[in-house]
Amino acid sequence: MQKIHTDKAPEAIGPYSQGIIAGTLFFGSGQIPINPETGEINAVTIEEQTEQVMENIGGLLSAAGCSYEHVVKTTCFLADMNDFQAFNSVYAKYFTGKPARSCVAVKTLPKNVLCEVEVIAELPGVED
């Protein structure tokens, strides 16, 4: 396994890696809307928070040598399912390949944010 670390995504706020490459797959840890430059949560609305989450995911994917087009599965966590449509409007701009997805509402997310997203991506040009 290879640990992925980048300053284009927030530092881990617990005992975990930003991401792991195992074989031909990249497993990205869940991203919340922390601005990696400041370590703060600046975004307020679900749309703003989703944009920051997507930027963080983009940084991780790039560090792993892949992109949004290589994502095969996402897991999305929302603090309020009433935000589903607004979340989707931002999500759809990034995940144009329409990977498999689960989306659930949860009671509380870290730092009381509105959304979190994790990804699994296939690494381009890597074979078992």
Image (spheres, rainbow, N blue to C red):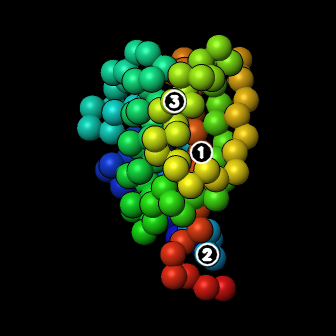
- The answer to whether mark 3 and mark 1 are in CB contact below 8 A is no
Say whether disc 2 or disc 1 marks the residue closer to the N-terminus: 2
Q: Nearer the viewer, residue 95 or 80?
A: 95
Q: Residue lying at the far bottom in this picture: please name it.
A: 128
Q: Is residue 29 visible?
A: no
Name the element at disc 1. strand
Which residue appears at 41% of the width and 33% of the height? 51
**How many numbered marks, from 0 up?**
3
Label 3 packing within 10 angstroms: few (<14), some (14-19), many (20+) = few
Quickly name the residue at label 1.
118
Where is the N terminus found, in terms of image quarters?
bottom right
Disc 3 target residue: 89
Res 24 label: 2
Between 14 and 125, the residue placed more toward the observer is 125
Q: Position of residue 52 (x, y in %)?
A: 39, 33
- The Cα atoms of the two marked residues, 2 and 3, are separated by 30 Å
> As drawn, is 86 to the left or to the right of 44?
right
Give left or right: position of 66 versus 102. left
Instruction: Locate residue 9, reporting x and y percent.
Output: 38, 45
Q: Quadrant of residue 108?
A: top right
The amino acid type found where label 3 is placed reads Ser
How many residues crowd mark 1 within 10 Å: few (<14), some (14–19), many (20+)? some
Disc number placed over residue 35 in the picture, else none = none
Q: Residue at x 44, y 16 (%)?
A: 45
Amino acid type at circle 1 is Glu
